[in-house]
Image (cartoon, grey):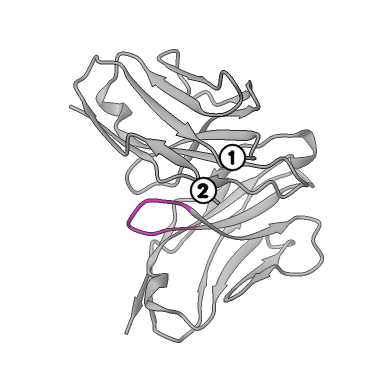
Amino acid sequence: DTGVSQDPRHKITKRGQNVTFRCDPISEHNRLYWYRQTLGQGPEFLTYFQNEAQLEKSRLLSDRFSAERPKGSFSTLEIQRTEQGDSAMYLCASSLAQGARDTQYFGPGTRLTVL
Amino acid sequence: AQKITQTQPGMFVQEKEAVTLDCTYDTSDPSYGLFWYKQPSSGEMIFLIYQGSYDQQNATEGRYSLNFQKARKSANLVISASQLGDSAMYFCAMREAMDTGRRALTFGSGTRLQVQP
């Protein structure tokens, strides 16, 4: 069983550039989540999809951030006009909508550094 | 107020001994779930154990058990027979309002556990 995969694992960019990250969930999982984790902190929720519908968004998801899951499988997270404060680990998770527990399984993350 | 509080930034334990990692939470929702995750230096968050607010018994998963005290709003993780591979960051997380379909997890700031030989 393949876990959640994320690409790229590391990204270095200059301030003002756009970046896009990809997440491939566990194959049968219909829910997909994005979180951001800064150094020394726990992950912070950004957004969540059920199939292709984006159902929940955090106020952390500013206008410069957009996430898509066009066919209900993989998802992309784009950050436009990056700022140094965007430097963080971006984590993707997926879950299977089954019961109350609905455990989220995480990928290895994409570490973004904005210079 | 913090939703999830982990008061121990770092903990040391001798190999083969048991260790308790503290977690307190704050919610007014009657339906919620509590999760523990392990994050090794590689960065991936690994699910360990789950406790639902309506569960009558404390959750156990192998060497992991959860000491759930609902009235005190605490959900401490107990790791028995510590191994060197247990050295990692440990995060407590909560999902509130589970009966309304909310899915976001709120994480604490974590506890770094170091297992000494």
**For numbered disc 2, what is the local secondary structure?**
loop
Residue at mark 1: A27
Mark 2 neighbour density, 10 Å: few (under 14) some (14–19) many (20 or more): few
**Mark 2 — on which chain does it sit?**
A
On the rendered structure, is A79 left or right of A104? Answer: left
Residue at mark 2: A2
Q: Which residues are magenta?
A: B38-45
**Quick one: which residue is furthest to the front in this view?**
A1
Total of numbered circles in the picture?
A: 2
Q: Quadrant of residue B66?
A: bottom right
Q: Is residue B60 visible?
A: yes
Do the numbered discs 2 and 1 sit on residues whose CB atoms are within 8 Å?
A: yes
**For numbered disc 1, what is the local secondary structure?**
loop
- Residues at discs 2 and 1 both on one chain: yes
Quadrant of the snapshot with the C terminus of chain B? bottom left
Q: CA distance from mark 2 to mark 1?
A: 8 Å
Mark 1 neighbour density, 10 Å: few (under 14) some (14–19) many (20 or more): some
Residue B102 on the magenta span: no
Q: Camera-side residue: A96 or B80?
A: A96
On the rendered structure, is B111 left or right of A52? Answer: left
On the rendered structure, is B35 left or right of B14? Answer: right
Q: Residue at x 53, y 40 (%)?
A: A93
**Mark 1 — on which chain does it sit?**
A
State the image coordinates of residue B70 (x, y, percent, origin top left): 73, 61
State the image coordinates of residue A91 (x, y, percent, origin top left): 44, 39
